[in-house]
Image (cartoon, rainbow, N blue to C red):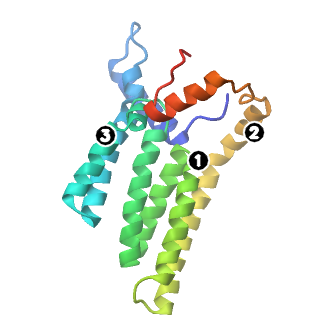
Amino acid sequence: NKGNNHLGFTIPTRAVHDIWASIWSSEDRPFSEAVIRFLPLLASFGSILLLGVLVARYSSPIVGLGAAFLLAICPWHLHYSVEARGYSQMIFFLLLAFLFMIRALRSGKWRDWLYMAGAQLAAMLCVPVAVDVLLVSNVSAIAMIFFTGEKSRSDRVTIASRMVVANLLAAMIYLQLIGPAVEQVRFYMSTGPLVGHMSLGWWSDIWVILTSGMSSVDQ
């Protein structure tokens, strides 16, 4: 009832769990936490692979391997990989969007811009605050279109127009899907769930969370 479930996690996970339940569930085991956490774990592996490929393709294989290793041992990545939320999938789709964005900037093709927009849509369905990252990346892409390379002005306008149209299509789909949850979130926030006293212990716990991915407080 809080309206804060990540749609990109909840809907596919419910489908996967329903499939599992139709085959293996029983009265003694009607629910599987491992199945619920399967998609975040799968996405975390995909993110490691995707980051390695992305960096290796545009830098060097050694650097790509190092980037993948650092992500694999990152405390927050480990935390998200088994959390029953949409953060792990968001990271995967953001990396996928970056890959398609780079391809689109080089090719200018509709196909690549649409792929990029689709990955961005998936990332925002997983966690809406992904819009912060996407805003920076899209503004950077516009700057690269108009201020780098040797394309003519008309070509630059054409490529930028394709990017804008692809993003508008994704935005239209996103608003239709996320709309029903907006009022629930507004109602939940109006109850003041985030209001509280931030003591010294709270700040200490935040530092532990940021550095290790885990809370020092037994909640």
Name the residue at the right extreme: 190
From this view, report whether residue 22 is shown above or below residue 63.
Answer: above
Residue 60 is situated, as x and y percent measured from the top left of the image, at 22, 62
- The residue type indicated by label 1 comes to Pro
- Quarter of the image that includes the C terminus: top right
For image coordinates 64% across by 54% down, the residue present is 175
For image coordinates 45% across by 56% down, the residue present is 119
**Mark 2: few, some, or many residues within 10 Å (few <14, many ≥20)?**
few
Q: Is residue 197 left or right of residue 70?
A: right
| Mark closer to the observer (3, 2) | 3
Query: Could you tell me if residue 60 is visible in this image?
Result: yes
Circle on res. 186:
2
Q: Secondary structure at mark 3?
A: helix
**Mark 1: few, some, or many residues within 10 Å (few <14, many ≥20)?**
some
Q: Is residue 146 left or right of residue 74?
A: right
Q: Secondary structure at mark 1?
A: loop
For image coordinates 27% across by 53% down, the residue present is 52
Task: State the residue position of label 1.
Answer: 128
For image coordinates 56% across by 30% down, the residue present is 206
Q: Secondary structure at mark 2?
A: helix
Check whether the beta carbons of the residues at disc 3 and disc 2 lie within 8 A of each other. no
In space, the residues marked 3 and 2 are separated at their CA atoms by 36 Å
Task: State the residue position of label 3.
Answer: 72
- Whichever of callouts 3 and 2 sits on the residue coming sooner in the sequence is 3
